[in-house]
Image (cartoon, rainbow, N blue to C red):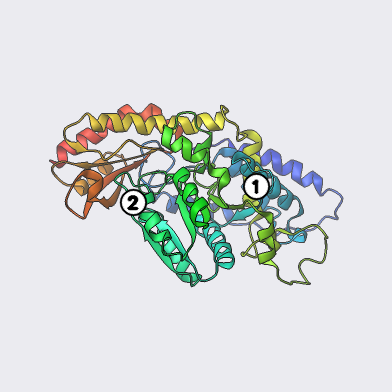
Amino acid sequence: MLENDTPRALQEALQVLEREFAGLPDFQAADAGGINAVMGEVASRLGDNYPYFHPLYAGQMLKPPHSVARAAYALATWINPNNHALDGGRASSEMERQAVAQIAAMFGWREHLGHLAGGGTMANLEALWVAGRLHPGKKIAASSQSHYTHERISGVLQLRFAKVASDTRGRMDPAALECLLKTGDIGCVVATLGTTATGSVDPLPEILALRDRYGFRVHVDAAYGGYFTLADNLGAEARAAFDRISEADSIVIDPHKHGLQPYGCGCVLFRDPAVGTLYQHDSPATYFSSRQQHLGEISLECSRPGASAVALWATMRLLPLARGGEFARGLSACRRAALALHARLADDARFMVPFEPQLDIAVWAPRGGSAQRIFDEAARRNLHLALARLPGAFFGSTEPEVLTLRSVLMKPEHEQWIDRIWEILCEATNHAH
């Protein structure tokens, strides 16, 4: 079941890499004795995991990296470049620039400032740090269904934070946002295009219209959903939001989610390259070697893995970010899988479903019985789901919260496994009752 083409491709690539340094004098590399025994132990210990790579794992946002990403990442570790200064990662820094430019182009930006980061949290921190510098003393606002990291980051940056109420589909409520904006102390609004709980897409066109009236900064947190701009089967509201994403001031996307990359690989983009002046700092021992801008001069992080850039570049070389291409078709398959599961849930009297998935996440709750028991029974049958506490209003309930089941169908293979997933879910539900 585990993909095993990577070791063969890596072995051939290592031979090519070694020839690149053939002019160096020979030296004795570190002894790798005992590695086989240790790696056997590592493999045994890694078996104590859920099968994240398998289509029957549909719980959290875990997706195996593409084989080319695995091989390219591993190959880069033989050099172990550091994409902070050009001295530490000359080739990998250029690959990062090219990869980030392709992501920016996917959102319609030719001019931009951006770089890779350790993940969505660090990428969002940089975006909110810039917002705080440009609108000092003003609040960051995000929906009640946005990722908790925004409130936590605001605290770290000592920025005030305001939660905006969500509608019954998990989207930011523009009317509630306008009430906050009338206070005059909102400096940046975070629009989430793909919440982690339900995959809901905030109404970006309405938020941008409010920006025209109230003059705040718009940051789009598309860490989870950003790549869906390439999908050909979004609903009208989600499509309208993604079609306006180029009008945001900053965007975050996580290649280590739908971008088929190993952890951790996030990306932050700014529409105005002039925000780079906010990063200015001195490091005479680091940046002396080139007049070209070093990535560390536009990043809050210092040492950063060049291997992440190499893996991302290689993946997009194989699977370009093009509408209608193989990569885009995989995203559309994920949404079809979520819609198929949602349709079955909606037609079954045993379940309550709040709304149609906007991306590839389906949520539901049992009308009777326990979500926890269904979760446990499904896991005993090798179907791994997730639990989430969501507002009762999503389900028309007067209860403040409802414990729900959640399925993240982020592997294209999930589309072919819906029958089996449904079969196991039904068995688990019947047994739980």
| Residue 177 locus on image (x, y percent) | 39, 55
Whether residue 317 sits left or right of residue 324 in the image: it is right
Q: Nearer the viewer, residue 37 or 119?
A: 119
Q: Which disc, if any, is residue 166?
A: 2
Whether residue 185 sits left or right of residue 21 in the image: it is left
Label 2 element class: loop
Q: Amino acid at mark 2?
A: Ser
- Residue 1 showing in the rendered view: no
Which class describes the residues within 10 Å of circle 1: few (<14), some (14-19), or many (20+)? many
Front position among marks 2 and 1: 2
In percent of the image, x 70 and y 63: which residue is there? 297
Q: Quadrant of the C terminus?
A: top left
Q: Amino acid at mark 1?
A: Val
Q: Which disc, if any, is residue 327?
A: none
Task: Reply above or below: 371 against 9.
Answer: below
| Residue 34 locus on image (x, y percent) | 58, 57
Task: Reply above or below: 261 against 214.
Answer: above
2 or 1: tag closer to the N-terminus? 1
Residue under numbered circle 1: 100
Label 1 element class: helix
| Residue 175 locus on image (x, y percent) | 36, 51
Whether residue 189 sits left or right of residue 314 in the image: it is left
